[in-house]
Image (spheres, rainbow, N blue to C red):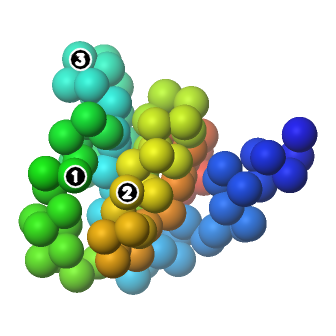
Amino acid sequence: MFGFLKKLFGPGTDFKALMEQGAVIVDVRTAGEYKSGHIRNALNIPVDVISSKIKELKQQGKPVITCCASGMRSARAAAILKQNGIEAYNGGSWVSLGNRLN
């Protein structure tokens, strides 16, 4: 079980350090979920449309940290971004990620 979780969320990613390097947080939940609460300054790009935003994210030239409600959609989004040459990390749930950044 822990191996699965480690694979899902990555081996000890230092999200604070990534943010200090200018990383962008992309919340991949729906617009409604995002409106109910999110990490300040996070972009809302639902996982279903993230492929259409690849060019824009690449142009920023910054690492991307994805988050969602549980970590499942953000894992999928991070994989899509990585496949398209973007440095991407699965931050898991937006609540948990927010707590790790504080």
Does label 3 or label 2 sit earlier along the sequence? 3
Task: Indicate the secondary structure of the residue bearing disc 1.
Answer: helix
The image quadrant of residue 46 is: top left
Q: Which residue is mark 3?
A: 32
The image quadrant of residue 40 is: top left
**Viewer can see residue 67:** yes
Q: Nearer the viewer, mark 3 or mark 2?
A: 2
Q: Nearer the viewer, mark 3 or mark 1?
A: 1
Q: Residue shown at 27%/25% (left/top)?
A: 30
Quarter of the picture holding the N terminus: top right
Task: Indicate the secondary structure of the residue bearing disc 2.
Answer: helix
Q: In the figure, 58 relative to 81: above or below?
A: below
Task: Indicate the secondary structure of the residue bearing disc 3.
Answer: helix
Q: Position of residue 22 (x, y in %)?
A: 32, 76
Mark 1 neighbour class, 10 Å CA radius: few under 14, some 14 to 19, many 20 or more: some
Residue type of the residue flagged with mark 1: Ser
Q: Which residue is mark 2?
A: 80
41 left or right, relative to 38: left
CA gap between label 3 and label 1 equals: 20 Å
Is there CB contact under 8 Å for labels 1 and 2?
Answer: yes
- Which residue is most to the front? 83
Q: In the figure, 51 relative to 72: above or below?
A: below
7 left or right, relative to 72: right
Q: Nearer the viewer, residue 74 or 44?
A: 74
Is there CB contact under 8 Å for labels 3 and 1?
Answer: no
Q: Tell me the tag on residue 51.
A: 1
Q: Tell me the tag on residue 14.
A: none
Q: Position of residue 44 (x, y in %)?
A: 22, 41
47 left or right, relative to 61: right
CA gap between label 1 and label 2 equals: 7 Å
